[in-house]
């Protein structure tokens, strides 16, 4: 079967959609199609990928307008009677074709206070933790840093508030640190001020696109918001803290 | 003369997988300046794909385990061609390296009493693999990455090294280009550590990512370092075989560790048919005992599905060749059968093997809790690599170090699953420490700028050609040759054919043409990778010709037996004065008496 792909070609200074028609085979994913086009019709087509197994989070792009991993999107799940539209992620500056500059994400992470464990529990320098106490954090650790959630979040995508809001990926990261049973650091003020957690209005778009099925909003963002609210807005708690701070 | 942006570091680390990150962290901890370079983004290296776990004799699950057992297992798995001192250091130091990850924030699955849980894996006598479901590599690389970003290491992402620079005998720096704009970058360094991973992309069917083009092996070889054990390419027995576009993607050995069994089209459990002598007394002789072993019964022996990878892969090839394969030229791997043994089997499988569940559901429409998977061998790991000193990880070139999959020695003729992740940490730490020491004790050697300019001009030649091959086509042809002629089962005439085919490809690679400009140009990247792929392919083939016996991962149809007379040696590959590749024999070092005794006791 012949399928047409419309792929965005160009760099920061401009570009347009180009059409490519190829013969597809059973079981192909979008990334296979892109590779085939690259090998046969457009050697210089820019695309980022690594593992082709949904594990590295490199091949993020927008397929028919929806943020997805190209290597985990099967052609048979798309309507193929019309052209398949492939675009780079919109929330980040374009480098070329399907590749965007995601370096902002790396600089955001660097600013988050690092893991700080409590002293070891046992003489041999190890800790004791129970599976039920780490299940939640292990869910957050499934993140492959594909940044699809960042791409879909309107605070970054439409409002471009990259300076004020760290985005769902890094709220998950903060939650993972805050809920780590060994961690002793306190990041609540940070996540409120520099992190801009208040900008999130729980639309849950991030959870919908996460290829790792992390329940970003319910399990990470909402509990973080509650902790922040508890700390900073609860007048009774605030009063007590004031008392303790002064005695 | 052209000038390039130059960056100078005490220690330059090429590669940011588990090994490279651990090197960089250690070097930085010793107070030297560190630059870290990777071809892709930080955290995307191939280590992220590792699934089953990391081997370390923590003895959390079975207190009979200790470094001696791990050492003996590793040597037996490697058919005694391993560097025994590396195997000793690895077994002794791995537990501390794993515990260190926990101190840096990693969360491994837990035992009931709250310690790090360990699972069974092929060739390991006791449950030894610390793991996080089947995404251990992700946990490891993210932990190292998140730790490293606070250590003052300078990272150059999406930057590819295309040549090492030397001054006399010593390394002086490296030269590469960044992908975004295609600009060249020059790095000066007192010590360089190669941690570039493996070579899987030399084959058509592989579990490896696009980065695995053997760059580090080739960079070091052309800089005068010795390569060792290159004939030993590990073909993992279980890769996906259907649909065609996912062919090669790994199905973790963890499936078999959790009780998965291999069946042929007649639904026969064929792994019981042939059990190698070396493992006979460690292997179960009936199905019930094998099952008990996977469920932690300490009196039971391991099922034959958990024999070493080389053996399992060959048994699968035999079934397929003799017409007992599955519909798509594989065999069946079934974990769903455990529902006849335990309640809530489906839930158990999803919890223990979440990414396998996900992978088959998404890519093949198969629910592994209900149906068997179809699997077949896939190119997986390179035992061979840069020859290094066991303690310091320095290569035969002063100031040039190697760690991780790019280095040779620990695994001998065959690697045990889980021994790579531990290898990255143990020897990454060592390489970082000794590279820092070397950097403190030596001055930076001067860089020959003229030589750099020659390299730069050569690198852009493909843009200037008006005709010539498409680099992707040359790469495909190379993969086809290696798959067909230098695969799991080898013979002399095919290997010789491969050599001449590679020579022809070498010609074609010099004439490839790249279109477009230098900005993020994958075609150009592929053109530059070709040289590395060709170098490692030639090394694999030449070593495979020279080893006229079968041992570990290297199987010769024309010499099917192990040859104790000629085989007890390592093969080295060096660039001769005439620029041709030479094969040399290095006899094994006499093993220290105390280690020999351990091996004898554990026979
Ligand atoms: C699917 C899969 C599952 C596995 N599961 C396990 C397991 O459960 N347990 C286990 O022990 N082992 C496992 N392995 C093996 C193990 O993952 C690898 O051997 C290991 O991760 C290699 O790590 P590394 O640090 O040496 O290289 P990598 O992690 O591959 O890192 C290489 C780095 O070098 C960089 N690089 C390469 N060339 C250049 C260049 N020219 N210039 C600049 N940078 C360059 C890359 O960008 C990358 O950053 C698995 C392998 C695969 C494929
Ligand atoms: S729930 Fe919050 S973080 Fe997620 S997409 Fe909506 S606004 Fe963004
Ligand atoms: S939370 Fe999910 S969507 Fe966001 S970066 Fe991680 S894996 Fe991707
Ligand atoms: S290529 Fe790694 S997630 Fe798609």
Image (cartoon, coloured by chain):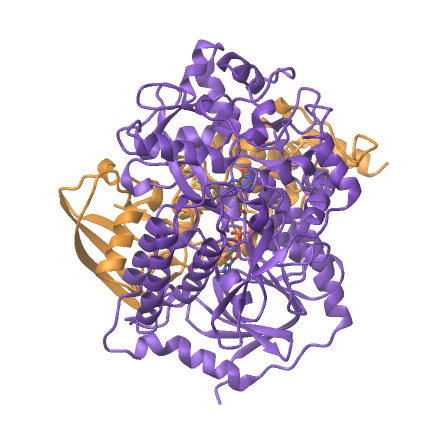
Chain colours: A orange, B purple
Q: Is residue B344 visible?
A: yes
Q: Is residue A211 above or below residue B155?
A: above
Q: Is residue B132 above or below residue B166?
A: above
Residue A137 falls left or right of residue A54: right
Residue A6 rendering spot, x and y as whole percentages? 21, 54
Along the line of sight, the residue nearer the viewer: A87 or B169: B169
Residue B535 rendering spot, x and y as whole percentages? 45, 64
Residue B377 rendering spot, x and y as whole percentages? 40, 38
Q: Where does the C terminus of chain B fall, quadrant-wise?
A: top right
Residue B451 falls left or right of residue A160: right
Q: Residue furthest right?
A: A247
Q: Residue furthest bottom?
A: B1
In percent of the image, x 36 and y 72: which residue is there? Answer: B518
Residue B352 rendering spot, x and y as whole percentages? 51, 25
Q: To which quarter of the image does residue B531 belong?
A: bottom left
In percent of the image, x 33 and y 55: which residue is there? Answer: B481
């Amino acid at each position: 079967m012949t399928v047409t792909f419309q792929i965005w070609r160009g760099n920061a200074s401009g570009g347009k959609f180009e059409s490519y028609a190829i013969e597809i085979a059973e079981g192909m994913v979008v990334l296979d199609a892109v590779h085939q086009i690259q090998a046969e019709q457009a050697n210089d087509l820019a695309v980022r990928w690594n593992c082709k197994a949904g594990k590295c989070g490199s091949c993020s792009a927008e397929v028919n307008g929806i943020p997805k991993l190209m290597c985990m999107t099967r052609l048979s799940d798309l309507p193929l009677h019309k052209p398949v539209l492939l675009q780079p992620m919109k929330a980040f500056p374009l480098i070329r074709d399907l590749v965007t500059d995601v370096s902002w994400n790396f600089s955001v992470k660097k600013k988050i206070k690092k893991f700080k464990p409590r002293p070891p529990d046992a003489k041999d320098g190890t800790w004791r933790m129970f599976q039920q106490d780490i299940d939640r954090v292990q869910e957050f650790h499934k993140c492959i840093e594909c940044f699809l959630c960042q791409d879909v979040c309107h605070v970054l995508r439409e409002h471009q508030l990259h300076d004020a809001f760290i985005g769902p990926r890094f709220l998950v990261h903060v939650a993972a640190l805050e809920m780590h049973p060994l961690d002793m650091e306190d990041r609540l003020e940070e996540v409120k001020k520099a992190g801009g957690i208040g900008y999130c209005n729980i639309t849950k778009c991030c959870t919908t696109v996460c290829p790792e099925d992390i329940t970003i909003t319910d399990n990470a963002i909402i509990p973080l918001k509650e902790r922040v609210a508890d700390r900073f807005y609860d007048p009774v708690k605030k009063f007590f803290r004031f008392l303790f701070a002064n005695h | 003369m052209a000038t390039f942006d130059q960056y100078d570091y005490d220690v330059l680390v090429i590669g940011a997988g588990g090994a490279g990150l651990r090197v960089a962290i250690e070097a930085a901890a010793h107070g030297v300046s560190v630059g870290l370079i990777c071809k892709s983004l930080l955290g995307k290296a191939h280590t992220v794909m590792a699934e089953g776990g990391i081997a370390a004799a923590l003895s959390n699950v079975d207190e009979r385990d200790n470094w001696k057992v791990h050492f003996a297992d590793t040597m037996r798995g490697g058919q005694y061609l391993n560097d025994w001192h590396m195997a000793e250091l690895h077994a002794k130091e791995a537990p501390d390296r794993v515990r260190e990850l926990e101190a840096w924030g990693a969360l491994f699955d837990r035992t009931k009493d709250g310690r790090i849980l360990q699972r069974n894996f092929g060739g390991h006598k006791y449950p030894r693999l610390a793991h996080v479901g089947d995404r251990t590599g992700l946990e490891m690389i993210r932990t190292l990455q998140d730790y490293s970003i606070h250590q003052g290491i300078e990272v150059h992402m999406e930057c590819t090294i295309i040549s090492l620079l030397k001054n006399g005998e010593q390394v002086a720096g490296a030269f590469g280009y960044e992908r975004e704009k295609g600009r060249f970058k020059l790095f000066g360094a007192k010590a360089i550590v190669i941690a570039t991973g493996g070579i899987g992309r030399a084959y058509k069917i592989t579990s490896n990512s696009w980065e695995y083009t053997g760059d580090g092996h080739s960079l070091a070889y052309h800089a005068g370092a010795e390569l060792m054990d290159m004939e030993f390419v590990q073909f993992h027995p279980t890769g996906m075989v259907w649909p065609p576009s996912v062919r090669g993607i790994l199905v973790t050995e963890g499936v078999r560790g959790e009780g998965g069994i291999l069946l042929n089209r007649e639904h026969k459990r064929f792994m019981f048919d042939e059990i190698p002598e070396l493992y006979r007394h460690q292997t179960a002789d009936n199905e019930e005992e094998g099952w008990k072993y996977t469920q932690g019964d300490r009196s039971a022996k391991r099922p034959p599905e958990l024999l070493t990878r080389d053996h399992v892969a060959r048994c699968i090839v035999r079934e397929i060749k003799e017409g007992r394969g599955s519909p798509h030229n594989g065999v069946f791997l079934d974990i769903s059968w455990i529902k006849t043994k335990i309640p809530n089997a489906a839930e158990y499988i999803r919890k223990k093997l979440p990414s396998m569940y996900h992978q088959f559901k998404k890519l093949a429409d198969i629910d592994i809790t209900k149906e068997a998977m179809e699997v077949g061998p896939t190119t997986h790991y390179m035992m061979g690599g840069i020859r290094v000193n066991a303690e310091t990880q320095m290569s035969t070139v002063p100031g040039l170090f190697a760690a991780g999959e790019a280095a040779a020695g620990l695994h001998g003729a065959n690697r045990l699953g889980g021994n790579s992740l531990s290898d990255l940490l143990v020897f990454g730490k060592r390489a970082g420490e000794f590279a820092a020491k070397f950097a403190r004790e030596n001055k930076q050697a001067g860089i020959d700028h003229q030589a750099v300019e020659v390299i730069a001009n050569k690198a852009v030649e493909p843009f200037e050609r008006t005709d010539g091959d498409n680099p992707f086509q040359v790469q495909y042809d190379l993969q086809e040759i290696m798959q067909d002629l230098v695969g799991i089962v080898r013979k002399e005439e095919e290997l010789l054919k491969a050599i001449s085919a590679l020579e022809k490809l070498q010609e074609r690679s010099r004439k490839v043409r790249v279109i477009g400009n230098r900005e993020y140009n994958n075609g150009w990247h592929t053109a530059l990778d070709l040289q590395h792929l060709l170098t490692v392919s030639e090394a694999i083939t030449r070593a495979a010709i020279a080893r006229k016996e079968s041992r570990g991962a290297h199987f010769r149809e024309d010499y099917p037996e192990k040859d104790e007379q000629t085989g007890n040696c390592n093969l080295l590959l060096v660039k001769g004065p005439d620029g041709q590749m030479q094969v040399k024999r290095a006899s094994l070092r006499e093993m220290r008496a105390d280690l020999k005794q351990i091996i004898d006791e554990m026979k």
